[in-house]
Amino acid sequence: EDQVTQSPEALRLQEGESSSLNCSYTVSGLRGLFWYRQDPGKGPEFLFTLYSAGEEKEKERLKATLTKKESFLHITAPKPEDSATYLCAVQASGGFKTIFGAGTRLFVKA
Amino acid sequence: ETGVTQTPRHLVMGMTNKKSLKCEQHLGHNAMYWYKQSAKKPLELMFVYSLEERVENNSVPSRFSPECPNSSHLFLHLHTLQPEDSALYLCASSLGRLGEQYFGPGTRLTVT
C-alpha cells in the first residue's frame, strides 16, 4: 500500500537554528514528490516538486532533497515567519492519486 | 480574483440542513479536487474531476454530493451531515491530473 510518513510530528527551533524535516515514502514507482507549506486557517501552498533520486530544489531558506526512500526539507537559519505546517505528498506511477503525509508543525521562536 | 477561491470560509450547520460549498479557480486548470482535512490527520481525497468528468470518488458517504458544471467551478452539496463531518474542506486545482495542486483557503465546517 502506498504510504507517506512525516517526522517529527512537531519541531521547535530557535531563530537561526538550522534543521531538517523528514518524509519517508513507500510507493509502487514514484512519479513525483511534493512539498507544501500550510499556515493556520489557510490552504496548503505549493513549494517544490522532486521527480528523481538525487534531485534538489531551493527556495530562500528552504532546500528539498530526494532519495529512493525519503525526502528531506532542510531549513537554514529559520525565522519566525517560517513557522507553519509542512506537508509532503507523493504521486505514484500507474495512478493519479496524490497521497499526503500528516505534516510537521514547525515553530520558530525569535 | 486570482488563484483558487472558496466560499463560504466558515459554515455552521445542523444535521438536518442542506448547504453547498463553492470553489472557483482562475488558473486555467482542467482538474479540480475536494479534500477533507481533520486535525492531525493527512488530507483525505474525496473527489476528483478532470475535464468536468468525475474520475475518482474515494468511498465518500452519499451525504456529500459533488458537482462540476465547468472546468472553473466546483461545488460540494451537503445534506444530513454528522458531527464527525466537521473539518476543513479544501478545494484544489491542477493542470492535468499529474503535478502540483493549488489550493483554496478552505471552508471550516462545523456540524452541530
Image (tube, coloured by chain):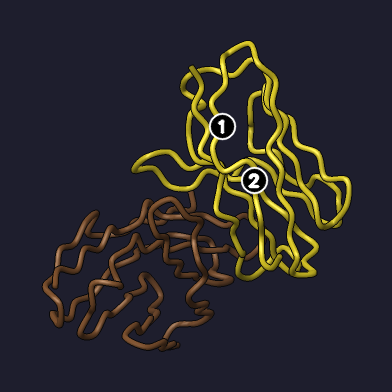
Chain colours: A brown, B yellow
A50, B89: nearer the viewer: B89
Amino acid residing under circle 1: Leu
Q: Secondary structure at mark 1?
A: strand
The residue under the point 50% across, 82% down is A52
A110, A82: nearer the viewer: A110
A104, A1: nearer the viewer: A104
Amino acid residing under circle 2: Trp
The location of residue B72, given as percent across then percent down, is 81, 57
* Residue identified by numbered label 1: B11
Q: Quadrant of the C terminus of chain A?
A: bottom left
* Numbered circle sitting on residue B34: 2
The residue under the point 36% across, 73% down is A71
Q: Do the residues marked 2 and 1 share a common chain? A: yes
Q: Secondary structure at mark 2?
A: strand
Q: Is residue B11 above or below residue A47?
A: above
Q: Chain ID for label 1? A: B
